[in-house]
Image: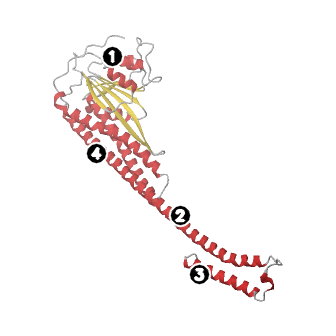
Amino acid sequence: MSERRVRPALSPKKHSWRRQPPPPAAPPAEPPAGDPAAAPGDVQRNGGSIVHAALYRDGRHVSSPASLAETFRQLREYRGGMAWIGLQRPSEDEIHSLAAEFDLHPLAVEDALEAHQRPKLERYGETLFVVLRAARYLDAPEEVDFGELHIFVGQDFVITVRHGAAPDLSGVRKRMEEAPELLALGPEAVLYAILDAVVDGYVPVVEGVQNDIDEIETEVFRGDPEVSRRIYELAREMVEFQRATRPLVGMLHGLMAGFAKYGTDEELQRYLRDVADHVTHTSERVDGFRQALADILTVNATLVTQQQNAEMRALAEAGFEQNEEIKKISAWAAILFAPTLVGTIYGMNFDDMPELSWAFGYPFAIGLMAVVCVSLYFIFKRRDWL
């Protein structure tokens, strides 16, 4: 691979990230179909991680190279052009090839390979390295899916490295190609468009989460036993969502603070301020969701406690009623036991029992039974057993 040509100095005027146009050079009418000097390890679009690679000049699409090596070569030939390379889960060889061609900082390259980074914006010389957390709402499982996007922005190139299904940048590329006057502003305009797409992707997520919270509130007051788990899972997703959106506020304010220093186009300034407003609004909504879920969880815990107290009170009342019935049964059993005891004794028919030959033995036994029964009845009545 031939050496990367020396980059011209940045222009002190607007569009500070764009390459200073060199002396005119006639570009080839049609870019070659392939690069004969490409290394055997170059990954083709159809067989590797290259999602899309395109070259632009003055906001117009010039070519779509099929490999990284071809992209590098054509970028050298199309002077004053810009390369937009999209990768998804690239290999180390691909990232190192890009790092060697575009002088990417080793720390940024390491972050792009490892992924699982927090949203951030870092400047390495003339190259910006941006990490974004995209999100999309999945209707079927009712959950939020997060993806990670790393962006390298230089004077004449934009490299996007996706880790995950979100975001789909094909719509961004199409929208930019349909607005050549915006694309002509250079890599900075592409960065704006990607930021705008990622932030716009938060809108359906916010709407989906709002619907989930409304459903959860209904389930809480309906007494659904599974609602606690749903609240907990949604609260965890909101923590991830907050980690994705909150750093963006500071990142965009950092970009806006460099408007004057880097001569950012006034139109882009307005666009970036609009994106910053949307991010701030989304971040506030997410903060509100977390607070709402915490309040709902507290209310649900209170309702569950009240329901448990009601069930315990009902059990206690049922136990009290059972005790009352047991006392009544026990009292009547004791009353009926007294005459049975007397009758059993007199039914033994021993010869030495003096009452057997007594004329008042029978009335005495009957009277004794009656006295014992009546006495027990009044005793139990007095103690509220009957």
The residue tagged with tag 3: helix, strand or loop? helix
Q: Is residue 199 above or below residue 336?
A: above
Q: Position of residue 344 (x, y in %)?
A: 76, 76
Numbered tag placed on residue 281 in the rendering: 4
Q: Earlier in the sequence, mark 3 or mark 4?
A: 4
Closer to the camera in the image, 76 or 94:
94
Mark pair 4, 2: CA separation = 50 Å
Image quadrant where residue 351 sits: bottom right
Numbered tag placed on residue 315 in the rendering: 2
The disc labelled 3 sits on which kind of residue? Phe
The residue tagged with tag 1: helix, strand or loop? helix
Image quadrant where residue 248 sits: top left
The disc labelled 2 sits on which kind of residue? Leu
Cβ–Cβ under 8 Å for marks 3 and 4: no
Residue farthest toward the right in the current orientation of the protein: 351
Q: Position of residue 347 (x, y in %)?
A: 79, 78
Which dot, 2 or 1, sits closer to the camera? Answer: 2
